[in-house]
Amino acid sequence: MHEPNPFQQFMEAVVPGSPSRALTARLRGLGRTLSIEKGRIAKLDRDCDQIVYVFEGATKLVAQASGGREQVVAFHFAGDLVSVPARALHSYALTGLMNTQVLAFPAASLVGAAVDAPLLLTEVLERSMAALHRCRDKAVGLGRKSARERVASFLTAMCERIGTRHRDRLRLDLPMSRRDIGDSLGLTIETISRQFGELRASGLIETTGRSTVDILDPVALAGCAGHFSDTVD
Amino acid sequence: MHEPNPFQQFMEAVVPGSPSRALTARLRGLGRTLSIEKGRIAKLDRDCDQIVYVFEGATKLVAQASGGREQVVAFHFAGDLVSVPARALHSYALTGLMNTQVLAFPAASLVGAAVDAPLLLTEVLERSMAALHRCRDKAVGLGRKSARERVASFLTAMCERIGTRHRDRLRLDLPMSRRDIGDSLGLTIETISRQFGELRASGLIETTGRSTVDILDPVALAGCAGHFSDTVD
DNA sequence: CGATAACTTGAATACTCTCAAACGAAGTGG
DNA sequence: CCACTTCGTTTGAGAGTATTCAAGTTATCG
């Protein structure tokens, strides 16, 4: 059992079916593998938009506004595809939450290379639409929800992405700090900590150490998230 | 000079080059033209994700959370392409800001029909990435910015999209109400009103009636937006 | 011109932030 | 293996910004 290759895994995950040799060669030429150490910023080409495949590890995409304020725009885990804009109203950086391996493509070149590979294009389109929809759901949280609802939303969403079963209970091993969570939810670390405390007191969660969260009552927690429902209100 | 056809204009705007007859016929069969009256919700097919081309007028995409709270996720104007999800964490609706004409496609079918039309696919991809990047910039505003900064951001962004020159000054004819602006920026109408008042008092803007805003000092206004800059801080 | 809806303004409240300090976990070196 | 250092987290008190509630005012439309 030899170590899997980042590029190979990317092809299997993102290009369904059997891609032509020509396409494979083309893409191999475009992609650059990068290691991102925990807490460090990926050294991406900042001259053009990048499309990054997370092969192993976890990252956060951070936007910087004036005054050093940071907003975590999204978290990513192995298998995810991230679009990193070169220039926008705010400055964006992809940062490792742990030691991470990624494969970075210039967005324009990737799309250009895919004109003959509709399956690759549709896959990228599919994923970027999904990202858009997630970003909108996040915007609703940031714009209209209380701290409690944001934290409950966050934990519920994380559960679906990286939750595991541990002795009959739902467990979450968070790779991000309280600060990261705060920067993602538009709250301060103190507020995050207080909300965790109250959820703990309410018996909805249990925490061990810094990163482990057991979800004792997933249904009640999701109920705190303030998502749309036809029944309530 | 006969009235332009929505479908024709869609093809010209979204499918560059000269599309094949087969593709044209296929797309024509998929698209449904809809009229959306001012203040009313578009009667879209809610069973699957939709891709909507705004032919004429303006719309807002509204997400509904629990408790009747609403978040305007994006505004759209003639020529824009909107992705409306069928089901997500929140309930989404496309609403007319004025009498509006749109062309709605089932997203999956549109993408399916485009497997042979890479230019259509790349155009849709391009636009959805742009939407993603705008949504992220919006998330930064909602998560990390003051009321003042959000309003300044909003006015600056609107200027670039629908600003006009009027006797040597930059004019904005806002099709949306204070409530819409508030729901877009995660603020209340009262806060919007107060911010407009203060910007007026500072001499940055001038308002006439409900919808006309003259930007007297675009540079200073943009400076209030709190966007990233290397120079400040 | 009158009615209605949208907007503006004011005062009191609430939620989260800021600042400050104590606590605990994780890692290092003896 | 333990003491020590450091960083992340927790907790508390006070301050600030936007919200809520309540009038009052101004556009816009019929």
Image (cartoon, coloured by chain):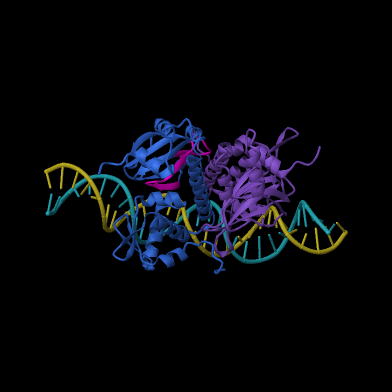
Chain colours: A blue, B purple, C yellow, D cyan
What percent of the width, then of the height, locates residue B141? Answer: 53, 46
Which residue is nearer to you in this view: A173 or A142?
A: A173
Asked which quadrant contains residue B124, the reply is top right
Horizontally, residue A167 falls left or right of residue B205, namely left
Identify which residue is drawn at 41% across, 57% down: A160
Q: Position of residue D27 (x, y in %)?
A: 77, 51
Q: Position of residue B166 (x, y in %)?
A: 74, 36
In the displayed structure, B7 sits above or below B93; it is above
Instruction: Let me know if residue A166 is in the magenta part.
Output: no
Q: Outermost residue, front direction?
A: B22
> Magenta residues?
A73-92
Q: Specify whether residue B230 is in view.
A: no
Q: Viewer-proximal residue, A43 or B172?
A: A43
Q: Quadrant of residue A4?
A: top left
Q: Which image quadrant for residue B162?
A: top right
**Residue at point 43%, 38% (across, down):** A19
Instruction: Say above or below: A201 vs A13.
Output: below
